[in-house]
């Protein structure tokens, strides 16, 4: 019996009645620091700066940003919506949450009603994650090893997690016997955040360098690669953290399967294929320094795309709270709409 | 016209008449510090601690370690040989150089003759690299983009480099128009060392995270992956820095070719296949900390294999100073012996 606080106690995004409290994920796992946002501009900045990250969590934070704007009047609201929308380009959950808030505004919602709408977005995400955990875990065989990438847990969502929710459900039901996490350069979400969540939950897990995935798979220890998503196109092509595409190719080479786990808010039927998804390029400095210390010679150039697109043909199952799409390359996503 | 000192001025391993001077590669690119070794134990420690790394450079350093031992008498020599041999397990150049020194000892070489032998090993490595540079560059088409991994340049050899020698020759002849380097976790040899060499040489190059290789290849910018080797088995299977196997799978998926460049001293005909190569596991701390600062939660476990094996079937050409083996899976390496 462990007394370590579990994932249930992690709240990356927390509404405090008059302000939005964000767990500062830049400082984890060693400093548990919170940033309070009282304006939509502060929320947009926190999204840009990765104080809060993970597609669902970004959407939820943006919805609360709209609530903060609404409390400042209609001018503030009109200004906040495009600003929040532009905070990051790849995760469609951001656009989805803002669209939903805008529909509520158009229907005449006042600040209090918008607060209920944001809370509903957050609550529904948590419920969706628990449901996806069940659906995803049911797809696994018995005694499987899984590899996950980036962080898709409580920190990336309203709680429990998407891919990490399936890992939690699969470990809890005994189907998963080994968990591996890629460290996820350059921001080390796997090393810093996923390992933190797993250790807190008492789930034995092993960290690997992103480069060691193929070598690990060659040993036969991985049956499933389980990842989240930042945008799923209508045909099932999936944008996710840089390195996901590489893992999917390597998994196919070794006969391991690939599961994408994301709420329906991540599915973008307006985007026909992965080729239509904008991939965010972040500051090359993220590759040129570690912890504020420069590691690469002056004059060096770096290319820092932080997402890539895995074609549907390399994905075995996409799990959403609306159901599972097996072999998405065959059917695409529309039939779940 | 640039006045930046070029690769010709980099000497990772330098005999100083009575001591071995090693450029401390742990501190590059910002501190150019040297470590003087006067005993074989210091040389073995420097190899273990990655003061000097890169398969050919390790072999050369070990040969000089034998010279230092010989100057201390036959007891020191008998003790030094197994100690140097055990310093690192995967790179066969270490065993090859020590075997060669042992043959000279058996033939009655005194300390002075052993000094000549070590110098010959070092000089021959430099000559081999220049020759391999020509051979490898001749295999490239025109206007190609290349991706390299780890550091295989002057720092890893007696000078010029193996894979990076081919890059130098290919850039110099105009065949290569774009160079990409993977940062190479966990030790960041690509970020810290390869980018340093390339910037010094005025070769425009772009650093990527190891995870971005597939996304880069999907853009069509890479025609060749060019890597070194730590051991090449008789059938052409190649042990090299962790991540190489993953790059080879991903290259094959995109129709890019894979070239392995290594001196004949890296070929181990006593090892039938890659399955027989011992893969070094290093301290998990290399994944759990950055620059002495812990980055991963306490209690986390990591797995840190620092090499992997790329099967010959995923390699298009192995370049040695004895010639090129195209499609090594067909013929293996023995016909060059």
Image: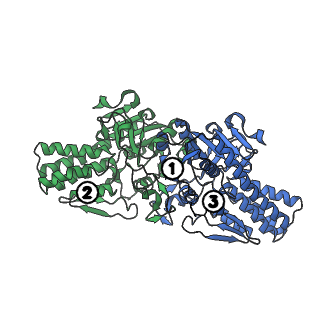
Chain colours: A blue, B green
Indicate left or right for A60 with B118 as reference: right
The location of residue A161, given as percent across then percent down, is 65, 54
Tags 2 and 3 on a common chain? no
Give the residue at x 77% y 68%: A68
Give the residue at x 67% y 52%: A90
Badge 1 vs badge 3, beta-carbon distance below 8 Å: no
Q: Secondary structure at mark 3?
A: helix
- The numbered disc on residue B130 is none
Q: Secondary structure at mark 1?
A: helix
- Disc 1 residue crowd, few under 14, some 14–19, many 20+, Cα 10 Å: many
Q: Nearer the viewer, residue B262 or A238?
A: A238
Dividing the picture into quarters, in which one does residue B46 lie? bottom left
**Foreground tag (2 vs 3):** 3
Q: Is residue A277 visible?
A: no
Against A278, is B263 above or below? above
Give the residue at x 51% y 66%: A292
Q: CA distance from mark 2 to mark 3?
A: 48 Å
* For marks 1 and 3 on the same chain, the one whose residue lies earlier in the sequence: 3
The chain letter for the residue carrying disc 2 is B
Q: Nearer the viewer, residue A183 or A220?
A: A220
Q: Which residue is mark 2?
A: B43
Q: Which residue is mark 3?
A: A7
Q: Nearer the viewer, residue B8 or B47?
A: B47
Q: CA distance from mark 1 to mark 2?
A: 31 Å
Q: Which residue is mark 1?
A: A210
The chain letter for the residue carrying disc 3 is A
């Amino acid at each position: 019996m462990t007394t370590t606080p579990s994932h249930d106690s992690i709240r990356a995004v927390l509404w405090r009645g008059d302000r939005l409290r964000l767990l500062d994920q830049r400082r984890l796992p060693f400093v548990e620091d919170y940033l309070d946002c009282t304006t939509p501009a502060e929320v947009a900045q926190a999204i840009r700066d990765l104080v809060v990250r993970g597609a669902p969590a970004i959407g939820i934070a943006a919805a609360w940003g709209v609530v903060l704007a609404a409390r400042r009047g209609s001018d503030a609201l009109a200004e906040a919506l495009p600003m929040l929308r532009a905070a990051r380009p790849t995760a469609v959950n951001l656009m989805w949450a803002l669209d939903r808030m805008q529909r509520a505004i158009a229907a005449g919602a006042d600040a209090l009603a918008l607060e209920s709408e944001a809370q509903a977005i957050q609550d529904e995400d948590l419920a969706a994650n628990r449901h996806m955990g069940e659906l995803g875990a049911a797809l696994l065989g018995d005694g499987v090893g899984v590899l996950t990438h980036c962080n898709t847990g409580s920190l990336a969502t309203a709680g429990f997690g998407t891919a990490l929710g399936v890992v939690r459900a699969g470990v809890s039901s005994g189907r998963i016997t080994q968990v591996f996490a890629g460290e996820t350069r350059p921001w080390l979400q796997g090393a810093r955040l996923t390992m933190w969540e797993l250790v807190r939950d008492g789930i034995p897990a092993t960290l690997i360098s992103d480069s060691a995935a193929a070598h690990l798979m060659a040993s036969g220890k991985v049956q499933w690669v389980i990842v989240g998503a930042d945008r799923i196109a209508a045909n099932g092509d999936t944008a996710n953290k840089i390195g996901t595409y590489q893992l999917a190719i390597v998994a196919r080479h070794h006969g391991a399967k690939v599961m994408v786990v994301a709420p329906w808010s991540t599915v973008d039927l307006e985007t026909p294929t992965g080729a239509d998804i904008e991939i965010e390029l972040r500051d090359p400095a993220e590759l040129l320094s570690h912890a504020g210390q420069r590691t690469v010679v002056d004059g060096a150039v770096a290319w820092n795309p932080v997402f890539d697109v895995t074609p549907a043909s390399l994905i075995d199952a996409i799990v959403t709270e609306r159901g599972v799409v097996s072999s998405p390359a065959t059917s695409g996503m529309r039939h779940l709409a």
